């Protein structure tokens, strides 16, 4: 960010112009978050972070805005405590006390003020970084605001990806008036507008044979719903055909819930459809009586099949570190616990080094593409760019959510246009999955995974 800002000032753009642009963007986000006539309390420090928030004030017409400039923490705490006794209660606090320049521990008086803000029960919107978070490391300087939402400016700061407890939902205001960015990084934030024009247009004379055939090996006794959800996820990606191969003892409940999807009981040595273009193995294969031949066949497919292949859930534990065909698409989609088993470490160790874990997983399993699920899902492989997903929320943490994502990704990869760029397909699948959850959380707070299946793939990028 400092290099980017330096290049901007050298181009002739002024700091004041950027601050005014940030103020307009911040005001728009505040207006989206608050009802008409809702009260907003801006806590602004003396630096540029405070200037950004002060620049938003004139653009908040229709909102009851209280602006408190704080340079001394003792006086600030007294004013804050007095303000809490006022009415109406603020809808949001805007935290603009400290920005990315903070590089020293906060003294006891600042810590008391921050503790009071955190304890008041009013959600905080942090401008650029939550006050007290070191933007480089993610560590706190003795104390930090626990924001519900952080609107960071230009691009995410590395420390924000390590401080979810304080950052809350991370959003990026990318177009703040800076010059073209002069630097690149291997870790990249995903913006919705990157998916403009997707999914690809289809030829008006096309037929289902042009759009691939996704095969899904999923579902066992006690876990048949996973096969159904995975199939519905694949359907939302619109491949030409979908076939599910559940265990024979759950064929009836799986087939009974699917209409356009073909369902055949899995048989050892049974052939895949001749026109199959992608295969997903794993969801709902958690029963104790699975045949050993299923695991052997999956490993053989990984080693030899030219098909695009997605391995998820229980089948991840069947993987072996063996080569796969160089040109064949291979994707694994572990959550942190599964990643830890594959790397022979704990989920906590994976979470403490997510990017390194993704790289290690890909390197171990034939340079495959990896979707490392969780808060800010990562997509990439052993070398090259890694992308951080920007959509989604904690309500995705429910059974069946990952099954939908795996099916959706397999449905995309069944199609020739998507197979040309597996990383784009993975990023798009993860983003659509999270964006559907965000839409549902805003409009239907008690949504279920079945509702998610209805919205998957329907979110417009802008």
Image (cartoon, rainbow, N blue to C red):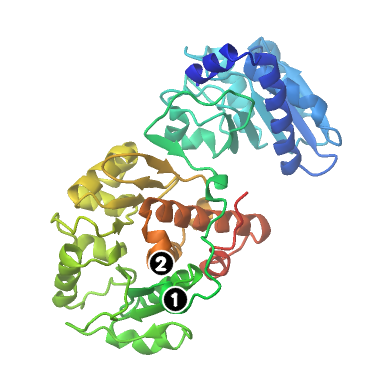
- Give the vertical position of 338 relative to 277 (above or below): above
Q: Residues within 10 Å of mark 1 (few under 14, many from 20)?
A: some
Mark nearer the N terminus (2 vs 1): 1
The single residue placed furthest to the front in the displayed view is: 205
Horizontal side, residue 146 vs residue 265: left or right: right
Distance from disc 2 to disc 1, alpha carbons, whole Å, reads 8 Å
Q: Is residue 101 visible?
A: no
* Mark drawn on residue 415: 2
Q: Nearer the viewer, residue 85 or 436?
A: 436
Name the secondary structure under disc 1. Answer: loop
Could you tell me residue 207's position as x and y percent?
48, 78
Counting from the top left corner in percent of width and height, residue 449 is at: 51, 67
Q: Viewer-proximal residue, 165 or 317?
A: 317
What is the quadrant of residue 175 in the picture? top right
Estimate the x, y position of residue 282 in percent, counting from the top left.
30, 68
Residue 259 located left or right of residue 372: right
Position of residue 292 in the picture relative to residue 379 (left or right): left
User: Where does residue 8 sit, x and y in percent of width and height?
Assistant: 57, 17
Examine the rendering and report whether any part of residue 353 can be seen: yes
- Disc 1 marks which residue? 240
Residue placed at 50% from the left, 21% from the top? 1
Q: Residue drawn 14% across and 77% down? A: 293
Residue 414 to residue 117: above or below: below
* In the rendered image, the vertical position of residue 133 relative to residue 120, given as above or below: above
What residue is rendered at 62% in x and 20% in y?
113
Question: Which of the 4 quarters of the picture holds residue 120?
Answer: top right
Q: Nearer the viewer, residue 229 or 386?
A: 386
Query: What is the tally of numbered marks visible in this picture?
Result: 2
Q: In the picture shown, does residue 93 fall above or below 415?
A: above
Res 50 quadrant in image: top right
Q: Secondary structure at mark 2?
A: loop
Query: Tags 2 and 1 in contact by the CB under 8 Å rule?
Result: yes
């Amino acid at each position: 960010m400092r290099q980017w800002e330096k290049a901007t000032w050298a181009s002739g753009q002024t700091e004041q112009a950027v601050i005014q642009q940030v103020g307009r963007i911040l005001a728009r986000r505040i207006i989206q978050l608050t009802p008409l006539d809702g009260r907003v309390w801006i806590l602004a420090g003396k630096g540029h972070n405070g200037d950004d928030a002060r620049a938003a004030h004139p653009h908040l017409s229709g909102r009851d805005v209280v602006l408190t400039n704080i340079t001394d923490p003792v006086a600030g705490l007294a004013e804050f405590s007095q303000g809490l006794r006022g009415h109406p209660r603020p809808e949001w606090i805007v935290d603009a006390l400290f920005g990315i320049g903070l590089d020293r521990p906060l003294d006891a008086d600042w810590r008391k003020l921050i503790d009071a803000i955190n304890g008041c029960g009013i959600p905080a919107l942090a401008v650029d970084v939550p006050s007290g978070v070191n933007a480089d490391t993610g560590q706190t300087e003795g104390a930090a605001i626990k924001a519900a939402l952080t609107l960071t400016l230009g691009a995410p700061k590395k420390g924000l990806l390590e401080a979810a407890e304080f950052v809350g939902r991370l959003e990026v205001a990318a177009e703040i008036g800076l010059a073209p960015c002069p630097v690149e990084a291997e870790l990249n934030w995903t913006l919705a507008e990157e998916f403009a024009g997707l999914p690809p247009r289809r030829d008006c004379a096309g037929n289902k044979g042009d759009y691939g055939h996704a095969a899904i090996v999923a579902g066992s006794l006690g876990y048949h719903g996973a096969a159904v959800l995975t199939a519905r996820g694949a359907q939302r990606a619109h491949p030409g055909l979908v076939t599910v191969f559940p265990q024979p003892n759950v064929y009836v409940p799986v087939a009974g819930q699917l209409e356009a999807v073909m369902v055949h009981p899995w048989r050892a040595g049974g052939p895949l459809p001749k026109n199959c273009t992608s295969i997903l193995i794993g969801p709902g294969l958690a029963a104790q009586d699975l045949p050993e031949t299923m695991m052997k066949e999956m490993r053989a497919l990984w080693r030899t099949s030219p098909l695009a292949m997605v391995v998820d859930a229980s089948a991840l534990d069947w993987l072996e570190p063996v080569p796969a065909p160089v040109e064949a698409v291979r994707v694994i989609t572990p959550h942190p616990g599964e990643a830890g088993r594959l790397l022979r470490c704990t989920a906590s160790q994976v979470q403490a080094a997510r990017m390194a874990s993704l790289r290690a997983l890909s390197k171990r399993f034939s340079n495959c593409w990896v979707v490392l699920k969780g808060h800010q899902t990562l997509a990439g492989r052993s070398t090259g760019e890694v992308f951080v997903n920007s959509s989604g929320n904690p309500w995705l943490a429910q059974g069946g959510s990952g099954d939908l994502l795996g099916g959706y990704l397999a449905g995309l990869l069944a199609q020739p246009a998507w197979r040309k760029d597996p990383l784009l397909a993975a990023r798009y699948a993860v983003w659509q999955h999270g964006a559907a959850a965000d839409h549902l959380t805003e409009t239907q707070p008690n949504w279920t995974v079945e509702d998610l299946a209805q919205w998957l793939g329907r979110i417009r990028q802008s």
